[in-house]
Image: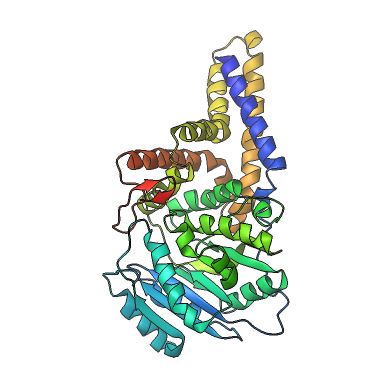
Amino acid sequence: MEWTLFVAAILSLIIWFYLITLRGWFWRGDEEFDPDCAEPAVWPGVVALVPARNEAEVIGEALESLLTQDYPGDFHVIVIDDESEDGTADQARAAAKACRKADRLTVIRSEPRPPGWTGKLWALAQGRKQALAMAPDYLWLSDADIAHSSRNLRGLVAQAEDEKLDMVSLMAMLSCESFWERLLIPPFIFFFQKLYPFGWVNDPEKPMAAAAGGCVLVNAEALEAAGGFKAIKGAVIDDCALAARLKQVAGKRGRGIWLGLCDEAQSLRGYDDLGPIWQMVTRTAYTQLGHSPKRLAAAVLGLVLTYLAPPLVVLVGVYAGLFADISQFGITFLAIVAASAAWGLMALAVWPTLQRYEQPVGMALLLPVAALLYLLMTLHSAWRHKRGKGGAWKGRHQTVVGGEAA
């Protein structure tokens, strides 16, 4: 057993050395949005598209933050009511009236969703069609549960114009107050940055592309060149699918895309218990793996070696040492040292994300617990897909094939 512990510890240590030094420095979280970028001489026109399905509880606050943007150019907001049953559209109109910006808002009712489309992308496609009459230079895709600072749009457009970007996307600050949020939300952000190192996304020489769907500014001309939302109509992970197409288009246009962290967009959705977080992850986890059993097995093995092996080796090794002959404890001792070093690198890597969410340093040692839960969510996601319930969201179930709705 001592050699098994030793090999597992060494492999984990090698993985963490790679992640710390060779994975685009993702863990530093230094791709920060600066809303005070140099401003353009002429402010382009912008239309915000807000797809909303049963969002009456939060859409009022989200819309108020959109409608009261301090933006010098032409700006309009279109809410696409995606067959809501809770009065979402009425709440949207009431919010516009309350902040005296009714002239800035259009609310449309989504038409029945055609086969092959996901609900969000179908809603966005209809919003884009409505926006064509306004001939905007940019479309601002904002989720109905995201609140923005009054200067956010100004900063997004300024960065896009100054740095010649066809997409600027911001990872909104998520709620981190309940026990489950504190345990799982910072690791969620950490894992996303590890999967899509923001520095690589923002490098036009690298093929990696990603976006955070809650806040995305898109150049309207580039979106047209990319085939519009129809080109990705069945994508369940729609933000990253859109980013991939736009990065290809941006490269041909001599432009780029950008993804970063920010304080200017805040999620209004809280997670008081584990269930909603579990649902959010299981909806797309197996899709992220391309619905491949081989990739699932590789992901499970990778998660075990990367996050679970270090604490397990330390605990098992220490326990075994209590009963081992000291002369035979050498390999086990080296395994404990290597596993402790890997666990230390793990804690070091997640610490900047924990700092961002104002969490105590001790939470860094609990990353393996969060990783175990995310591993179980991924397995549950695969099981749901096998049962034909993949991609379920807000009462809709759709069969998902190859990462797309069928």
In the displayed structure, would residue 340 be above or below residue 47? above
Q: According to the image, what is the colour scheme of the structure?
A: rainbow
Residue sitting at 52 percent across and 63 percent down? 227
Q: Nearer the viewer, residue 271 or 105?
A: 105
Point out residue 134 in the picture as x, y percentages from the top left corner. Answer: 50, 83
- Is there any visible trace of residue 316 in the rendered image? yes
Residue 373 percent coordinates (x, y):
44, 41
Residue 53 screen position, x and y as percent? 34, 67
Task: Determine whether 266 is above or below 202 in the image.
Answer: below
**Along the viewing direction, whichever of 149 and 406 lies nearer the viewer:** 406
Q: In terms of depth relative to the viewer, which is nearer, 299 or 208? A: 208
Q: Give the total number of marks visible in the rendering.
A: 0
Q: Which residue appears at 40% of the width and 57% of the height?
A: 271
Q: Residue furthest left?
A: 85
User: On the image, which quarter does residue 381 sit in?
Assistant: top left
Q: Position of residue 171 (x, y in %)?
A: 56, 61
Residue drawn at x 59%, y 61% is: 246
Name the image quarter holding the N terminus: top right
